[in-house]
Amino acid sequence: MKKMKSILKISLFMTILFQFSCTTETPTDLTQTAFIPKPVSVTATGGNFEISGSTVIYVQEGLQKTGEYLAGAIERISGFAPEIVATKEAETSGIYLSLSATSPDLGSEGYEMKIDKKMITISATSPAGCFNGIQTLLQTMPVKAPAREKLHIPTGEIRDFPEYAYRGAMLDVGRHFFSVDEVKQFIDYMAMYKLNALHIGLTNDQGWRIEIKSWPKLTEIGGSTEVGGGPGGFYTQEQYTELVNYAQERNITIIPEIDMPGHTNAALASYAELNCDGKARELYTGIEVGFSTLCTGKEITYQFIDDVFGELAALTPGEYIHIGGDESHSTPLEDYIPFVNRVQQIVLKHGKKVVGWDEIANVALVENSAVQFWDNVKNTTMALEQGAKVVISPAKKAYLDMQYDSTSTFGLHWAGYIEVDTAYSWEPLEQVPGIKKEQIVGIEAALWTETVSNMDEVEYLVFPRLPGYAEISWAAPNTRNWDEYKIRLGKQNKRFDALGIDYFPSTRVPWEE
């Protein structure tokens, strides 16, 4: 009887909720939309645009894929499948994606959007800009609407462009392996908030996750486990290419990391000859760091690196390969320096630029290289003095694997606790004394996976902090304010709930009922 009463209560609640949703007033004030990241400017004109079964998406040449992405999103939301029509000129009704924007302020990723009662026009200088405009447009819609119910978009104008060209997140798949579908889900979360760089940690002491055809034991042995002794896993080269293409369709570039000379136990367990004593190491499933190192004095080590980077570079259209270089405590500095110098030349040989953690600033950095500041200001200053640029990823502010507080279910706290307001309230230009904006490539929030093994656990650490990192990298500093931002973030819980995101319900955010 109690169970039946509970079912009736739930049924009544859902009926009331549905009736309420059907009678909600049509939105007409575009400025009341809780956009994240915050656009440069939003003005409202007090009407609404209607998406129905007759809505057509018109696209200029070069925007077919972008139009298909928008059409797919609208179909998932409403059940309507808009027709996509190629055109050279704007129509009088529908949605129009255009490359006709001319304002130099927009750069390659900015956009202008005009919404009136009959027409939505998104104009940019590149497909990337139009894609970013689409993400803003999607935030004016529910995640899921009743099937084939018309969608109403408030009218107005938006002008928008990013503060930094590189807006990244890092996912460590070395400590715990994540499937192709799980990485795609992570990519989709990034795209929602206009992040455009996925740094993926493909190797670590606990696992080697990318197929290298010339060194097959790397995945056969090195990919066979993970933290805690699970089954591990790896990506075939075809699967990696699938991820690269999926990311590119969402304006995201993949930056692969092969960490070295430390964090290499999975490789050392796979091939005995990579060890100075010629003996293969045991597989490792713990979470300690700093105990492993490639043998920097053997030529076979550099042949190995050349082969790995050669195969990886051929699969990676992005300009960077990340060489790691961090926490190599078992490699004497007199060995570390010539090692990294040779590795840099191998990266250049394969047509890529070097990026590594801030420790690599101890060597003579090659031209056009970048260091990733995570901990050591002195190292990063040395990099700047050599003309390198910097990716800003301070562990005390931007490490997604840090716990929110002492009660957090997942994560660590060696760099401190990072509550949602702490994650948002910092400025990239204040992390390294004397650094100039033009020396910053962008910012990146990093997720190490010692304590998380599935997407529900990942979501708990990523949300609700990820939208804040996206806003720091997109919006100008003088437009960012925690007290204003937390109101917008509080309205995102509807999206999180509709998407099934298991987020941390921080008490510092006024979540909407």
Image (cartoon, rainbow, N blue to C red):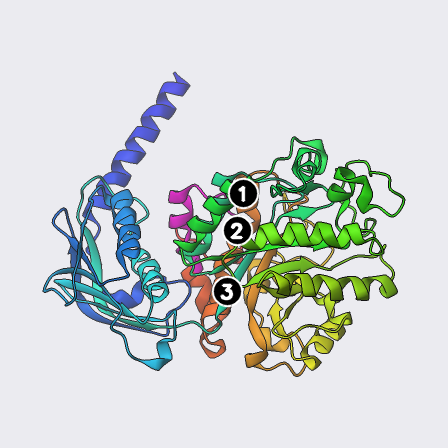
Q: CA distance from mark 3 to mark 2?
A: 22 Å
- Which stretch appears magenta? 489-503
Question: Which residue is labeled 1 in the image?
Answer: 237
Question: Which residue is labeled 3 in the image?
Answer: 167
Identity, as a three-letter code, of the amino acid under mark 1: Gln
Disc 2 on helix, strand or loop? helix
Residue nearer the viewer, 391 or 491: 391
Image x and y of residue 75, in percent: 25, 44
Which residue does the image show at 38% across and 49% down from the upper left?
Answer: 494
Q: CA distance from mark 2 to mark 1?
A: 8 Å
Q: Earlier in the sequence, mark 1 or mark 3?
A: 3
Of circles 3 and 2, the one toward us is 2
Residue 121 as seen in the image, left or right of residue 426: left
Which residue does the image show at 33% across and 57% down from the upper left?
Answer: 139
Residue 315 got which mark? 2
Residue 231 as seen in the image, left or right of residue 147: right
Disc 3 on helix, strand or loop? strand
Identity, as a three-letter code, of the amino acid under mark 3: Arg
